[in-house]
Image: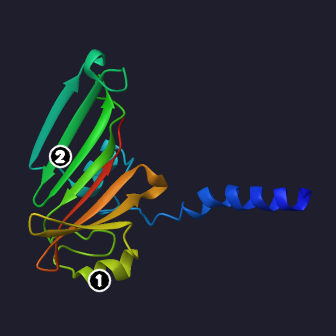
Amino acid sequence: MKQITSFVLLVFLSFPVLGQGNLREVDLRVSGIGSGTTYSTVIRNLGNPLQRKATRTPASLSCTGAAETDVTLIYSGLQVSLLGDGRGRNLTVYSIEVISPKWMVSGIRIGTSMEGVESKFGEPISKAEEAGETIFDYVTKDNLGMVNFYFRNKQLAKVVMTETLC
């Protein structure tokens, strides 16, 4: 009886593990810029942006409970967003959006086929159809957020990496 109980426990305890397959992680990089990259490195690698937008959020409105500064750097076909403290210091990348083939994105470019993206990054964790686009979803390195590949007519049209902030 003890052996049967042990076997039943082993089977039931194994079910949660079986449901947690390995998620395909993507460490998205554009010219060496990725999640957690500092502001100074972004400027050094990409140069001065065409436009810079900064927004300060007081602690009372922030989901972290601390004042924050959100800075978005806009380049031709590329947008990089960074988050730092309320004084605009310690800014690090939390979001990247690419819409131009000018930028190499972890070895691929806008215009790459759906098959080319899957060949490079493997099977996505999910695929969706929305407003005429096919979207492949992956998780970021260390599962801090999502990487989404948007396709129109089976060609890559946009890549978005966003960390989950709260």
Residue 22 horizontal/vertical position (percent): 52, 65
Which numbered marker is on residue 116? 1
Q: Which amino acid does label 2 sit on?
A: Leu
Q: Which amino acid does label 1 sit on?
A: Gly
Hey, which residue is sitting farthest top in the picture? 60
- Tag 2: Cα neighbours inside 10 Å, few (<14), some, or many (≥20)? many
134 vs 122, left or right, is left
104 vs 158, left or right, is right
- Tag 1: Cα neighbours inside 10 Å, few (<14), some, or many (≥20)? some
Classify residue 139 by image quadrant: bottom left
Which residue is at 18% across, 42% downward?
A: 72
Element type at mark 1: helix
Which residue is at 89% across, 61% downward?
A: 3
Q: How is the image coloured?
A: rainbow
Residue 70 horizontal/vertical position (percent): 23, 34
Residue 92 horizontal/vertical position (percent): 35, 41
* Vertical comparison of 73 with 130: above or below: above
Which numbered marker is on residue 73? 2
Which residue is at 16% across, 80% downward?
A: 154
* Vertical comparison of 105 with 163: above or below: below
Viewer-side residue, 138 vs 161 = 138
Query: Does residue 165 show up?
Result: yes
- State yes or no: discs 2 and 1 in contact (Cβ < 8 Å): no
Element type at mark 2: strand
Residue 79 horizontal/vertical position (percent): 17, 52
N-terminal-most mark, 2 or 1:
2
Classify residue 52 by image quadrant: top left
The nearer-to-camera label among 2 and 1 is 1
Viewer-side residue, 141 vs 2 = 2
Where the N terminus falls, by quadrant? bottom right
